[in-house]
Image: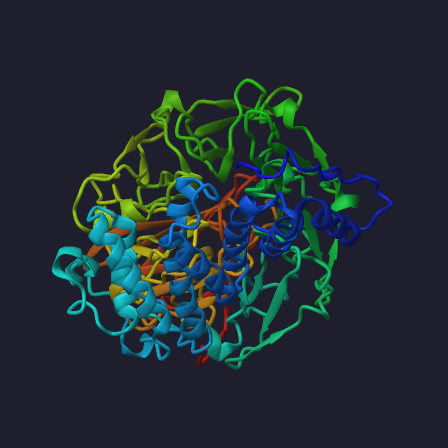
Amino acid sequence: MKYLFTTLFSVLVFVSCDNKKTMPELLEETAENQFFVPENIYASSVRAAYFDSIAQVAPKNQKERYNLKRARALLYAGKTEEAIIILENLRDASSGGLLLYKLDAHEEESIGPLLALAYMRLGEQQNCIHHHDASASCIIPINPKGFHQVPNGSRNAIKLYEEFLRQNSHDYNSRWLLNIAYMTLGEYPEGVSEKWLIPESTFESDYPLQKFEDIAPKLGLNVNELSGGGIVDDFNNDYLLDVLVSSWSPSDNLRYFINNGDGTFTEKTETAGLELVTGGLNMVQADYNNDGFLDVFVMRGAWMGILGKHPNSLLKNNGDGTFTDVTIESGLLSFHPTQTATWADFNNDGWVDLFIGNESEKKNIHPSEFFKNNGDGTFSNITSCVGLSVSTKDQPFYIKGVTSGDYNNDGWMDIYISTLQASSKNLLYLNNGSDDKGNISFKEAGAEVGLGEQISSFPTWSFDYNNDGWMDIFVAGYRKSDFYTIVPDITKEYLGERNNAETMRLYQNNKGTFTDVSAAVGLDKIGYAMGANYGDLDNDGYPDIYLSTGEVSYESIIPNRVFRNNLGENFQDVTTAGGFGHIQKGHAVSFSDIDNDGDQDIHVVMGGAYEGDKFFNSLYLNPYDVENNWISLKLEGIEANRAAIGSKIEVLVTEDGKTRSIFHTISSGGSFGASTLRAQIGLGKASEIKKITIKWAGSGTSHVFENLSLNTFYKIIENKAEAIELNLKSIAL
């Protein structure tokens, strides 16, 4: 990341580690010194004011340069109409040759595209936001309910994009945005010149998935903030799934919504004590103290480079409807840029430990962190002892995703790391188990097991996509650039043309070694996901994929993508059929049965990084509640960790006269977005459950349950012989 002002002034970036300061004080101090400063490209209002002040005193031949910078900052601050006025004046001046010697060629050429983008954004603000229809606005192909009622923004953008394309017919960025603009006016495809048209057929799905309706506004869950984390889980142990969301802006606090069980949610942020817990790009839940209530780890500082020394937070669930920030007293206080972490019982002692993947660059090294759970509410940083520093001065890794799983089925949880460097590789750290002193260690073995390729990637997870009992690995390709967006590559892929984008990878586990099967299963496509997760869209027993796509640029209005797992043999694009093609920035994704009807609904945190790029969160209601069979299991560990994270479930069923196994491991799923820890397992057309086998993480004990019913909720407690049937009623949403 480049910083434009390092020669103009310096800003204090040191944050005191004085434990006498409270976490709210540390968060406020960090925001003031490291976020709301002109060097931070995401602090758009601060930058706009800064450029305005410079323009006031700059020499006459420099004023327009700072006006252009101010216009860009205003646009990204959400002050679109102010930006348009400046850009229109600059464009007029450029047409009259009045900017000669005032702007360089690149700056002058940027005025037109920036103005077109401003008009596109104005159309979004006046229609998608102010006249929001959750299941139509900004979902492509846009249907009549999503057509813009105020057309001026898109109409002006169309004029400019057509002008750009007449000058350069290979301007794929303008071609994509032109087609989107025509969609917003209801004039696609017939209004688009044939030579610039992206055909309707490119958006067709591979499978007729039923449409999922976005019901977030109806439930009051359509939070309108920036990119952030999301967790859907039961925080008060009433067997109703609640919603916790964050926004990465230090101006925004966490938002906590309790499921009332009657089709409504009530926000309890203030009464839960969360109003001073601000920021957070990602979150992940676990019961770190084994008290039976789920706690939350909040991550901060990602993408910020040298300004990313932000503290994370550990929020203890007090079991009375409130949370307490125990970061300092638990020993987890540190200052590193991150947005990814994984909970697991790595040393098999019955307590979940924590691995945090930090972002490092050549001159900004932040080793990863491994915290051993001491079992008394505190953690010890033993990173070096276990061999998990990952980044060094000589070999830094910009870590964007981490996931844990027992990849070699030896009973010890391993770690896979996704890194955002095209010249780098992702890493697999195998857990060596404990030595004669009871200490564990890890060995990087990616190349040895078939995971040594160079790749730049972002979200990742572990799952058993083909139900063979071995954890496979998914990772979404992603390349960050300050000079270009992904839009041209996306356009080329839709047109069937060659592109240079990093694609998705699915690594099939062959009993401890891995094979890239992406092409064989139809996933050798552009994913370009930030948030992502997996779940079962239609309860057929095979995990599907939801990719929450985008990048920081306003130009990157690209659809979220969803792929259905077809019997573990291939994946089918069902984006359009399911109504998932949202073109606003997507972040944390959570699968959960939020209405207790047996299928998995999908919660998505929307919004971008710039303060003007806010958008409404979505909750997609699953229509497959009676299509296929299912079973839901709430596990409670005794010798294993209380939330049973890492425990393995095998469901043996009879389907169409044949026996098959369906595998599930307890986890929150993907590295960006947290699904419920309650296992919601689709069983397809199964006629009976023959048996369920549970191997408890940490303790290693196995239990077999027979005579369990289809389409039923159960609670299973380790060392208890009988499963407890839960009489949970479906909630009408």
Q: Residue at x 57, y 38 (%)?
A: 3
Q: Which of 394/708 is in front?
A: 394
Q: Position of residue 553 (x, y in %)?
A: 43, 50
Q: Is residue 725 above or below residue 339?
A: below
Q: Residue at x 54, y 79 (%)?
A: 264
Q: Which of 95/317 is in front?
A: 95
User: Does residue 144 appear in this view?
Assistant: yes
Image side of residue 163 versus residue 31, left or right:
left
Q: Residue at x 40, y 25 (%)?
A: 423
Image side of residue 30 versus residue 340, left or right:
right
Give the mark count: 0
Which image quadrant for residue 174? bottom left
Quadrant in which the C terminus appears: bottom left
Q: Which of 22/615 is in front?
A: 615
Q: Position of residue 547 (x, y in %)?
A: 37, 53
User: Does residue 686 appear in this view?
Assistant: no
Task: Return the residue found at the far left.
Answer: 194
Figure coloring: rainbow
Which image quadrant for residue 160? bottom left
Q: Which of 483/361 is in front?
A: 483
Q: Position of residue 715 (x, y in %)?
A: 52, 62
Q: Is residue 409 above or below residue 176?
A: above
Q: Position of residue 308 (x, y in %)?
A: 63, 40
